[in-house]
Amino acid sequence: MTADAAAPQPTRQPRPVEEFGPGSVTVPPPGDPATFPALQTEIRELARKQNAVILAHSYERAEIQDVADHVGDSLRLSRVAASAPESTIVFCGVSFMAETAKILSPSKRVLLPDIKAGCSLADSITVEQLRSWKAEHRGAVVVSYVNTTAAVKAESDYCCTSSNAKAVIDAIPAEKQILFLPDMFLGLWLQRVTGRKLTIWLGECHVHAGITPADVERLRQAEPGAELLVHPECGCTSQVLEAATDDAAFGGAPRKPVHILSTEGMVTYAQQSPAESFLIATETGILHRLEKKAPGKRFVPVNREAVCQYMKLTTLAKLRDSLVLGQFEIDVPAETSIRARRALERMIAIS
Ligand code: 13P
Ligand code: SF4
């Protein structure tokens, strides 16, 4: 793994991915597509009877996105979870998202269809590591990406998502030291766009870290007319931005600008842009949403292997079982929840 050579280096050494990686997770087959319509009808009926709202992240399987009440990025789904009138929230996503929903709506039942749906990025910092990091930097403001455990959020001053990370950093007084965690690539990009020096934890998402500058360059050469949309968790972000300003290195031909966007930002951008083709650097589940929301446009994944095994654990059968069996119910200890809620409410208030 490399960091942007031009930017101040993040602190800490990465943990070897074997310690927390998705190796133990087996992605289940989707089942027979011919069974999907009947399963989706059954799920909708169960949700209606149980007064449940189904939320799905944009990285979920297409058939899960299609049966959900709301599909979106972390910020949008957190906002929906905070205000949903239903008594049950079924979160088709990963565990930190279901925990976030529970913290924001503590009186509701929150279900996660597969309890193994974790996140390598959230696992890249423990609450003990955060406590000792804070002890080394007393007085610093802690900004945690929403991809963290509830215990880590409880030790944080602010949460943010990729949609509002810049606005959150901008809201903190300039003289304050900021500890930013856990994603180093997002942290490096934030330094660039805010002009602030951040103290950055050296964590990463195994999916986005695997999207390399070489992947981007290959596609840009092959598709010179396409616009490039990059999620800030990507391992290529800093180098792609450097290359974007260096036309001479690419034969002097002006290059199309690079857009660094959250998943929801990509959808909005693609809808509004006059361009017909887009190169997409993030988890491939977003392609289904992009194709639905911007019909007639062409979306090419920068890396077809960029698949989050955790997100793909949720199948229609598991979602149905979740509603039938009331599993897996997510709970967050009250003391952790109260402290984490403060940081999350600040996140929701800033956009
Ligand atoms: P957003 O949904 O905030 O763009 O984040 C992407 C992600 O990796 C969620 O796990
Ligand atoms: Fe976590 Fe990465 Fe999967 Fe998002 S894509 S849930 S950050 S492992």
Image (tube, grey):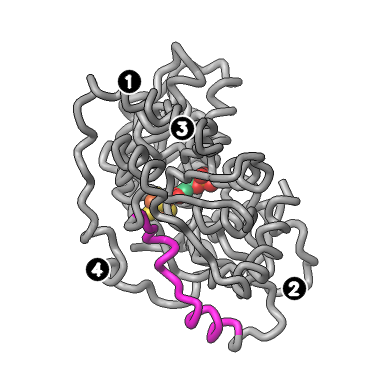
Mark closer to the observer (1, 3): 1
Label 1 or label 2, whichever comes before in sequence order: 1
Dot 4 or dot 3: first in sequence order is 4
What is the CA distance from the residue labelled 3 to the residue labelled 2?
34 Å
Q: Note whether 289 is above or below 308 in the view shown.
A: above
Give the number of the mark in front: 4 or 3: 4
Q: Which residues are magenta?
A: 117-134
* Tag of residue 18: 4
Residue 122's image quarter?
bottom left
Q: Residue flagged by tag 3: what amino acid is it?
A: Leu
Residue 172 against residue 84 in the figure, above or below: below
Q: For mark 3, what is the residue? A: 228
Of the residues tagged 4 and 2, which is closer to the observer?
4
Sequence-wise, the earlier of marks 3 and 2 is 2
Give the camera-side residue of 297 and 251.
Answer: 297
Q: Which mark is residue 284?
A: none
Spot occupied by residue 70 in the image (x, y as percentages of width and height): 54, 33
Decide: few, some or many residues near mark 2? Use Cα within 10 Å; few <14, some 14-19, many ≥20.
few
> Which residue is more in the foreground, 75 or 189?
75
Give the amino acid type for the residue marked by disc 4 in the picture.
Glu
Residue under pointer 1:
37
Report the Cα–Cα distance between label 4 and label 2: 35 Å
Q: Secondary structure at mark 3?
A: strand
Work out whether mark 1 precedes mark 3 in sequence or the reverse, and give the earlier one.
1
Looking at the image, residue 101 sits to the left or right of residue 13; the answer is right
**Residue marked by disc 2:** 176
Q: Is residue 94 above or below residue 73?
A: below
Please name the residue shown 57% across and 35% down the image: 265
Return the x and y of residue 46 as percentages of the image width and height. Answer: 44, 33
